[in-house]
Image (cartoon, rainbow, N blue to C red):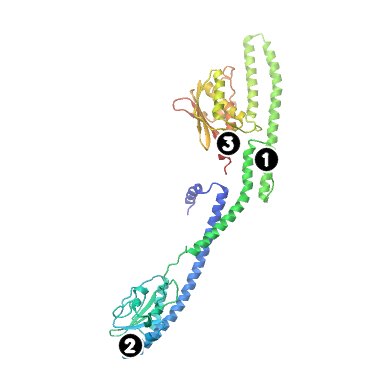
């Protein structure tokens, strides 16, 4: 198989695999056990089949020699004594052969096929041809219920018990009967029927017999049960690690993981605990740094503003104050960007519709028009961060699009909040760029237009911290459409 075909099959099979680590482990164990059983059954069957053929070869040769002796004896008898000997044999009973002398060859419904029959027939023909020095000998197999034994083609089942047919009938097994016929002379045929003591001579070998199926099922269930116990103990630390990683975004002060279990698990838990401690230290240091920068910059900005107010030229005073306002806005925006998502805020159930209506009321006081449709069940989020995310999106929609239309769409997997404005939209080439800090497609930074280009970036930062995403698209009828997708907690924590 070429590498291209291998990759194609791999792409087709990967989506069919279980999505959980536990499921994949169980699948590997099942495939491994079934493969081992298939291989062992193949070897075992080959050995058993070879042993059976060896036994059948030896048995068929012994019986062939006995049949050859019987035929030699009857061929040596004078014609008038043959029937006397046959009558004596019938009266005595107990013989392993059923022998008759007929005027013609009795038709036999030959049955069976495969290596077993070929081996028996070839052995009989070889030995009879060599021992009796003849070329024409018929070797066939028949069912007991269809076997005919005399000139009048009477059935074996219809013979009296004293005639010895009981040696060929082994009800309810009904094994096939070997029939050998040879011509002794004109209109004289010697007929010999016997059984080969081999059970299920022509029955096809069944892989899934009841015993083998039961044994395989018991082995498979035992392996799956033990595997589930072992895999559960192996994957439990991974589940704890996954929950701790998800909780890390909500609470940096969560207790560290227990460093117990196998060496690899202990090493992973230890590395995670060190990472959590470093992240917590870096976040605290970043907050202290930007708080210090903000505090230190406020003093010179205030002094410059006081001096600017003392300028006599109104135009210069206005320009100087505008620059100071811009500088103050950038400082506040930088600090807001750093504190865009409060990692120490507790998660609480929030009604998205109620929060949207609250924000719409606040925007209405400023002249903004917002309409809301749809409902959603309560969503566990950090309230202040979630409110800030929605506020930034709705303020942008009202500011650039004059009015906003908000639609709620709830499902068991996620909550979708679509905010559409009626503004100019955004060029496709700029869709990703507007999430960068301090990027505004509206070039003005005056106090009249406001904004520092941080709103969308902070909103995306908050959405991703909650496991969601924000997507932008231009509406076919004009305006920008912002979609906020937030997953339900059960879909976030599922392995």
The front one of 79 and 34 is 79
Q: Is residue 48 above or below residue 370?
A: below
Q: Earlier in the sequence, mark 3 or mark 1?
A: 1
Distance Cα–Cα, label 3 vs label 2: 100 Å
Q: Is residue 441 above or below residue 230?
A: above
Q: Which residue is located at x 35 percent, y 77 percent?
A: 156
Distance Cα–Cα, label 3 vs label 1: 20 Å
In the structure shown, which secondary structural element does the residue marked by tag 2 occupy?
Answer: helix
Q: Which residue is located at x 52 percent, y 38 percent?
A: 413
The front one of 458 and 243 is 243
Work out whether residue 395 can be spotted: no
Q: Earlier in the sequence, mark 3 or mark 2?
A: 2
3 or 1: mark nearer the eye: 3
Identify residue for label 2. Answer: 83
Q: Which residue is located at x 38 percent, y 86 percent?
A: 91
3 or 2: mark nearer the eye: 2
Can you tell which mark lies on residue 467?
Answer: 3
Rendering quarter of residue 395: top right
Please state if 451 lies on the left or on the right of 65 as rendered.
right
Tag 1: Cα neighbours inside 10 Å, few (<14), some, or many (≥20)? Answer: few
Q: Position of residue 348 (x, y in %)?
A: 61, 32
């Amino acid at each position: 198989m070429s590498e291209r075909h291998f990759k194609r099959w791999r792409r087709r099979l990967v989506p069919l695999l279980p999505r959980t680590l536990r499921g994949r482990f169980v699948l590997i164990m099942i495939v491994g056990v079934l493969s081992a059983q298939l291989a062992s059954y193949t070897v075992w069957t080959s050995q058993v089949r070879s042993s059976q053929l060896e036994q059948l070869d030896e048995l068929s040769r012994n019986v062939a020699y006995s049949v050859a002796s019987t035929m030699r004896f009857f061929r040596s008898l004078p014609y008038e004594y043959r029937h006397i000997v046959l009558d004596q044999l019938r009266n005595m009973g107990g013989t392993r052969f059923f022998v008759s002398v007929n005027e013609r060859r009795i038709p036999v419904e030959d049955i069976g096929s495969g290596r077993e029959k070929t081996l028996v027939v070839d052995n009989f023909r070889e030995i009879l041809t060599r021992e009796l020095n003849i070329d024409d000998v018929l070797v066939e197999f028949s069912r007991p219920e269809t076997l005919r034994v005399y000139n009048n083609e009477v059935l074996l089942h219809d013979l009296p018990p004293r005639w010895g047919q009981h040696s060929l009938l082994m009800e309810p097994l009904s094994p096939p009967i070997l029939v050998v016929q040879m011509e002794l002379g004109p209109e004289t045929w010697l007929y010999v029927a016997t059984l080969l003591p081999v059970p299920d001579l022509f029955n096809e070998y069944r892989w899934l017999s009841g015993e083998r199926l039961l044994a395989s099922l018991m082995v498979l269930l035992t392996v799956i049960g033990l595997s589930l116990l072992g895999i559960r103990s192996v994957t439990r630390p991974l589940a704890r690690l996954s929950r701790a990683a998800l909780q890390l975004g909500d609470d940096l002060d969560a207790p560290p993981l227990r460093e117990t279990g196998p060496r690899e698990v202990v090493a992973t838990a230890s590395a995670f605990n060190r990472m959590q401690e470093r992240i917590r230290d870096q976040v605290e240091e970043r907050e202290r740094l930007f708080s210090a920068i903000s505090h230190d910059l406020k003093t010179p900005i205030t002094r410059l503003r006081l001096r600017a107010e003392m300028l006599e030229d109104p135009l210069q005073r206005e320009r100087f104050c505008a620059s100071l306002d811009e500088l103050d806005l950038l400082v506040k925006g930088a600090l807001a960007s750093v504190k865009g998502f409060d990692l120490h805020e507790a998660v609480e159930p929030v009604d998205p519709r109620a929060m949207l209506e609250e924000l719409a009321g606040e925007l209405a006081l400023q002249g903004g028009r917002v309409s809301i449709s749809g409902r959603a069940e309560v969503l566990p989020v950090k309230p202040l961060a979630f409110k800030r995310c929605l506020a930034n999106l709705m303020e942008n929609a009202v500011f650039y699009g004059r009015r906003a239309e908000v639609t709620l769409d709830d499902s068991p997997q996620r909550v979708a909040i679509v905010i559409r404005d009626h503004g100019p939209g955004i060029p496709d080439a700029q869709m990703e760029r507007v999430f960068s800090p301090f990027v505004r497609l509206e070039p003005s930074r005056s106090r009249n237009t406001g904004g520092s280009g941080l709103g969308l970036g902070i909103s995306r930062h908050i959405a991703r911290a909650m496991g969601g995403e924000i997507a932008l698209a231009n509406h076919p009828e004009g305006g920008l459409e912002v979609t906020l997708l937030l997953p339900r907690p059960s879909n976030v924590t599922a392995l």
